[in-house]
Amino acid sequence: MPEDAEGIQGLYAELVGSAEIAVQPERIAHIAGDANTALFVAEIQARICGTALVSLCNDVMFKSQPFAVVENVVVTAASRSVGVGRLLFAHIEAFCLAADCSKIMLLSSAERADAHRFFERAGFTGSTKRGFVKYRRHFSASPNQP
């Protein structure tokens, strides 16, 4: 919901600590109308304590099955180990099952060992594939450059 922007922004700040984080209510509203994207928000006693974004990606490998990418998973430190993350991932899996996804992928910063243990308990395998990231600041300016 657009009114969750400030709470989500606080969670993202806890995750990455960047001054550039800017969660816009209108962007949340746009995502709410996109059948291929879901922004899950967890609350305890009307306070936002967790969030995760899921995007469905079209694929051609398995007929029309998409795959899902999970990003920006955050549970505030005060709400960890009480089932918030487990509940977020239950909703993620239900969303992905309803979309007939072939798989769910996520990336996690290499130093977040506690998060990695959580993801493994949630059924993700961190040893079968290797993730690569190229951030915007490293994008090429022109497709003609080598």
Image (tube, rainbow, N blue to C red):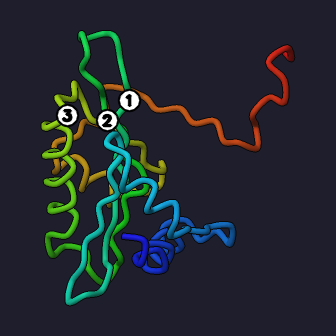
Are dots 2 and 1 in contact, CB under 8 Å? yes
- Mark number for residue 68? 2
Dot 1 falls on a residue whose secondary structure is: strand
Are dots 2 and 3 in contact, CB under 8 Å? yes
Q: Quadrant of residue 48?
A: bottom left
Q: Name the residue under label 1.
A: 57
Residue at position x 31%, y 77% in the image: 49
Spatial distance from mark 2 to mark 1, Cα to Cα? 6 Å
Please state which amino acid type lies under the numbered disc 2.
Ala
Q: Quadrant of the C terminus?
A: top right
Vertical order, 98 against 41 (above or below): above
Give the class, few, some or many, for how many residues have Cα within 10 Å of label 1's Cα (few <14, many ≥20): few
Dot 2 falls on a residue whose secondary structure is: strand
On the image, the x and y values in percent for residue 133 come to: 57, 36
Which mark is first along the chain, 3 or 1? 1
On the image, the x and y values in percent for residue 109 come to: 48, 51
- Mark number for residue 96? none
Which mark is first along the chain, 1 or 2? 1
Which mark is first along the chain, 3 or 2? 2
Are dots 1 and 3 in contact, CB under 8 Å? no
On the image, the x and y values in percent for residue 20 come to: 68, 67
Q: Mark 3 points at which residue?
A: 99
On the image, the x and y values in percent for residue 54 come to: 34, 47
Please state which amino acid type lies under the numbered disc 3.
Ala
Judged from this view, the residue extending furthest toward the bottom is 45
Please state which amino acid type lies under the numbered disc 1.
Cys
Q: In which quarter of the image is residue 60?
A: top left
Spatial distance from mark 2 to mark 3, Cα to Cα? 9 Å
Drawn side of residue 114 relative to residue 83, left or right: right
Spatial distance from mark 1 to mark 3, Cα to Cα? 11 Å
Q: In which quarter of the image is the N terminus?
A: bottom left
